[in-house]
Image: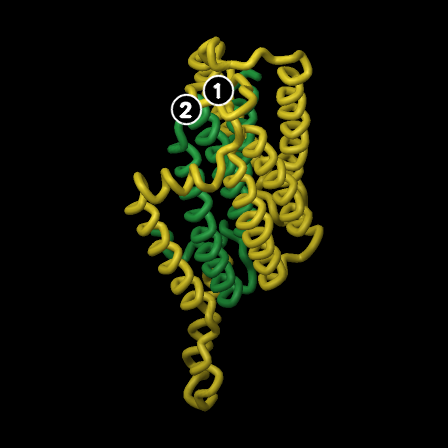
Chain colours: A yellow, B green
Amino acid sequence: MSAPAGQAVPLLLGLAIGPTIAAVVIGIVMVVAGIRLVTTDNVVHAAISLMGVLAGVAATFMLLGAEFLGWTQVLVYIGAIVVLFLFGVMLTRARLGEADLDAPVAQRWAAAGTAVLVFGLLTTVFVKVFGSAEITVVTGQAPREPGALTSPTTAADLAHDLFRDWVLPFEAVSLVLLAALIGAIVLARRDDREHTRPRVARPEIEVIDEEIGRGGET
Amino acid sequence: MTVNIFLILAAFLFSLGVYGVLARRNAVMLLLSVELMLNGVNIMLVVFGVMVGNLTGQVFALFVIAVAAAEVGVGLGLVLLMYRNKQHVNVDDADLMKG
């Protein structure tokens, strides 16, 4: 899927090679951080590794001309979600450096097999279907063509599409976010009545709670 | 640059996420691995959007980011609740509803 010759500005060698090298370097960073994420024994290190992967994804977005999406990635993912994860790690007091994070060895081998299978399947499909597809980097304000990477997508372009063709899904997503926000507050809220109620009325209920908790561990 | 660099990278991220979800027992690590999978899919969406030549892929990636934020919020809320009730976040031991 190459761009029509009329639109593509003739590329200098450096301009054609540059993005590929950048993609490879970003890819190596993401692969290393990702492998570290799924193998480390330390939850905080995993969260930091996730930050590396997310930064790589943001850089990839910008390489592909999705400028607004890249910055959204930085703000929402690196800024908010990673911090949320760090709060989660802190509040669940996962002991640092414990080896209890992983499943038994047999299950890990099965998981690795499944992951290799998924990767092989996806890669085979991609190579077979998109083996010859190229993204041409076109400089200047050329009209958008299939397979041609023109000037970065501006926020105005994206907003035009988002608020004209995708208004209803956008509103639905905002509703989903609101519901998730309220749900998270309701779920994680400490029930104050349990602590203010006189303790005399509570013992048998607490015993049952503890038994349920203990029953689950065996 | 060839499209396959990005697509194979995205597939690798997705597979790492699959491995993480299946091989980890800590609920927080599970959620981290799900984020890996979502990001792999996001890269694919943007690449396909460039190949098709419109912005639909980017709009979908934006939606995925929003839904991922909601998912992490609710997921961590559940994990906190689990920790409060059981003093651990081991998903293998969360089998109260097992038949």
Residue at disc 2, secondary structure: loop
Label drawn at residue A148 = 1
In the displayed image of the protein, which residue is found farthest to the left? A168
Q: Nearer the viewer, residue A24 or A140?
A: A140
Count neighbours of disc 2 (C-alpha within 10 A) and say few if under 14, some if 14 to 19, many if 20 or more: some
In the displayed image of the protein, which residue is found farthest to the right? A97
Q: Is residue A88 left or right of residue B99?
A: right
Marked residue chain, label 1? A
Residue A138 locus on image (x, y percent): 54, 20
Task: Give the quarter of the image for residue A92.
Answer: bottom right
Quadrant for the N terminus of chain B in the image: top right
Residue at disc 1, secondary structure: strand
The residue that mark 2 highlights is B53
**Mark 2 in CB contact with mark 1 (< 8 angstroms):** yes
In the displayed image of the protein, which residue is found farthest to the front? A141
Residue A116 vs A74, above or below: the answer is above
Marked residue chain, label 2? B
Q: Is residue A214 left or right of residue A17?
A: left
